[in-house]
Amino acid sequence: MAICYLSLCGQFLKSCLLFAAVSLLSSNTAKASTKVVDTSPCAIPTRTVSVVENSVNVSYTFPEYQKNSIPTSADSIYYSLPGFGFCNEVGRPKLPMRVDTFVIPEGFEATISCSSGGALSTSCKMVGVEYPLFDNGDSSPLTYSLIKPYSGTFPTESALINYEYTLRGEKVAEVLVSPVKYNQQTGKAELAEEINYTLTYTPIDESLFTDETDSDYTSWTVYVNGYLNNALAKIPKDIGKKVTYVPDDQKGIVGYLIVTTDKYKDPVETFAY
């Protein structure tokens, strides 16, 4: 048994642990600036993050999508994007997805609104999510699942709050973003050119943040950057003078322990620096 101990800043730790795959949707208006390529890698999607009063705005643009064929099924394909994972639910289409993660200020809750730019519409036969592989010595090739019948498009939302949980005493929200949606019945895929969403913070109990001596004053305005950075964006600096929340990474060093087997010791040790 190999045990590697490391001590890193909390924000960097969260960035490593919370890097994940995500899903985004497109609209129906085609724009020529988005294109499909067969070569690898395609252009990296761009993402901008800005902090405004009580909310964080996130915008993605997708200049290219990579089209991938399946050796065992000549007429089936899937699309991929640098920095994006895939839907991993067996029986669903294999679509690129990504998770953005946010820390929600203490005493607040988050809601999301989303809009999409244009989309490139294509006809294709999308492959299903592959069955998981097991570390049992079996060298069998990947096996792709059959897509279970569904109506309309999958997914149905461009960006949504997929999951909320508590990590080290902090409330975290995961936003699932999907640049590709697929209609199985029509065989049409829509590849988004851009996606924009806003995560808005509001107090769970507004009375706890109200100054009763001034009816026009509210003390719950937040200018906090809760966005947890990962591969495709830079963290914007917090702005404004009134911040009601201080992330743990500003409170000192946090240690953690990784337990693994000798087989994975070398790659795990890269996290210890």
Image (tube, rainbow, N blue to C red):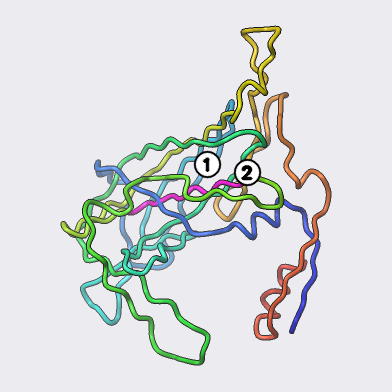
Q: Is residue 44 above or below residue 119?
A: below
**Would you call the spot at circle 1 few (<14 residues within 10 Å), some (14-19), or many (20 or more)?**
some
Q: Residues within 10 Å of mark 2 (few under 14, many from 20)?
A: many
Question: Which quarter of the image is occupied by the N terminus?
Answer: bottom right
Q: Is residue 173 magenta?
A: yes
Identify the residue at horizontal 32%, vertical 76% (top origin). Answer: 144
Q: Are the residues flagged by discs 1 and 2 in contact, CB closer than 8 Å?
A: no
Q: What's the amino acid at mark 2? A: Val
Q: Position of residue 76 (x, y in %)?
A: 24, 71
| Earlier-in-chain disc, 1 versus 2 | 1
Which residue bears the numbered disc 2? 103
Which contiguous range is marked in magenta?
Answer: 172-180
In what quadrant of the picture does the C terminus appear? bottom right
Q: Is residue 70 left or right of residue 245?
A: left
Of marks 1 and 2, the one in the foreground? 2
Q: Is residue 106 left or right of residue 199?
A: right
Q: Is residue 182 magenta?
A: no
Looking at the picture, how far across and down is residue 47, in whole percent?
A: 50, 45
Name the quadrant containing residue 8.
bottom right
Amino acid type of the residue tagged 1 in the rendering: Thr
> Residue at 39% of width from left, 52% of height from top?
178
Residue holding disc 1: 48
